[in-house]
Amino acid sequence: MPMKKVVIIEDQTAVRDMISQIVQADPTFEVVAESGDGQSAYDQVMEHKPDFVILDVMLPGLNGAEVLRRFAKHLKGTRVLVFSGYQNPALVRELLQAGAHGFVEKAAPLNELKKGIEIVANGGSYFGPEVAQMLRE
């Protein structure tokens, strides 16, 4: 089975490193690029054409929703999990319309992120408990 190529987009270095460690603990994933700002994130995704992207929303330059809108048009098969500390119903819906397959809030326990990564990377949709509750309201 070929490895899934992953791009991690997160502006906080420590958080990006933590996500990278979680992803690389799974032998079916290969982190091909990491980025901390919107424009370079878009460039990395277009260059590597990953199977899976973990995307923060609040980025310097282009925000996560804009990055997602731009690459989702070209890369229909790329799965996207949003991992953000900033969530409100309008933003979550905007990200879903832009092409996200899941959303885990940064306040959630780490196992929520791990679950989200596993489910979304393998073709499902996943929403952390706070976001799922918000979408039901």
Image (cartoon, grey):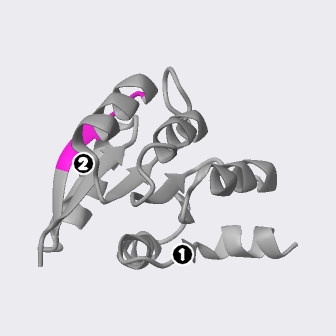
| 26 lies above or below 43 | below
Res 125 label: 1
Residue, x 41% and y 24% (percent of image)? Answer: 39
Residue, x 26% and y 40% (percent of image)? Answer: 34
Residue type at mark 2? Answer: Asp
Q: CA distance from mark 2 to mark 1?
A: 24 Å
Q: Few, some or many C-alpha atoms within 10 Å of disc 2 (few <14, some 14-19, many ≥20)?
A: some
Q: Few, some or many C-alpha atoms within 10 Å of disc 1 (few <14, some 14-19, many ≥20)?
A: some
Q: Quadrant of the C terminus?
A: bottom right
Residue, x 18% and y 53% (percent of image)? Answer: 31
Q: Does the magenta run of residues contain 36?
A: yes
Could you tell me which secondary element the residue under label 2 belongs to?
helix
Circle 2 residue:
17
Task: Tell me where the magenta segment starts and ends, as one range.
Answer: 32-37
The percent coordinates of residue 71 (x first, y second) are: 46, 40
The percent coordinates of residue 64 (x first, y second) are: 54, 39
